[in-house]
Image: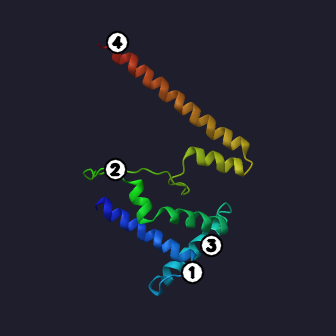
Amino acid sequence: MTLKQRIQAFAAVGSFIDRHFSQQGLDSETRLHQGLDKLVETAGIYNNWFIPTYVNEAIASIGLFLSEKELTAFTANLREVQPKTIAIICAGNIPLVSEIAPLLIVTKLEQFDYAGAAAIGAVMLAASFIMLLALNGLQAWSASRR
C-alpha cells in the first residue's frame, strides 16, 4: 500500500466521521452510523470514564485531522520505504489471560484492597531483585571465565 493509498483510506474515514456528526450519512452507511452510535453508548455503559458526549467530541476532533489536505501536509517530509514485518505486543486486561501487574495493582486499589495491592507490588519487587541478582551473578561468572 503506497503512502497516497493510505492517505486516501484515512481521508475516507475522516469523511465518514464528518458525515456522521453532520447527520448527512449516505444510505449505504446507515448500519455503520448506527454501529458507531451503539459502540459509543456501550463504551459508556461498561466504563464510566467514556462519557458519550466526550467520546463523540473526541471522535469528531480526530475526524478534523483526517482530511486529504491535512494528511498530505503531515506526511510531506516522509519518504517511502520498503515494507517491514513487525510484531506489536500489547498488554490486555482479560482476566487470567493477559492482565499485567500494574493493572492488577490498580484494580486492587480501586477495590480498596491496599494489602492486596502491596502484596502484588512486593512480589514484583522481589522478582525484579532476584532477576537483577541473577544477571549480576551471571555477569560476574562470565567475567571470571575470560
Viewer-nearest of discs 3 and 4: 3
Q: Which residue is mark 3?
A: 41
| Coordinates of residue 130 in the picture (x, y in percent) | 51, 28
Could you give the CA–CA distance between mark 3 and mark 4, rounded to whole angstroms? 63 Å
**Could you tell which of marks 3 and 4 lies nearer the N-terminus?**
3
Q: Which residue is mark 1?
A: 23
- Judged from the image, the secondary structure of the residue bearing numbered disc 1 is loop
Callouts 3 and 4 close, C-beta under 8 Å: no
- Report the residue at 67% width, 60% height from top: 49
Q: Residues at badges 2 and 1 in contact (C-beta under 8 Å)?
A: no
Q: Earlier in the sequence, mark 3 or mark 2?
A: 3
How many C-alpha atoms fall within 10 Å of the one at disc 3: few (<14), some, or many (≥20)?
A: some
- Tell me the residue at 68%/63% (across/down): 48
Name above or below for residue 40 compared with residue 29: above
User: Hey, what amino acid is under mark 2?
Assistant: Leu
Badge 4 crowding class, 10 Å Cα cut-off, few under 14, some 14 to 19, many 20 or more, is: few
The kind of residue on which mark 3 rests is Glu
Task: Kindly report the distance in space between the C-alpha atoms of the residues bearing marks 2 and 1.
Answer: 35 Å
State left or right for residue 137 relative to residue 119. Answer: left
Q: Earlier in the sequence, mark 4 or mark 2?
A: 2
Q: Residue furthest right?
A: 112
How packed mark 2 is, by other alpha carbons closer than 10 Å (few <14, some 14-19, many 20 or more), is few
Q: Which residue is mark 4?
A: 144
Dot 3 falls on a residue whose secondary structure is helix
Secondary structure of the residue carrying tag 2 is loop
Query: What amino acid is found at the position of numbered circle 1 in the picture?
Result: Gln
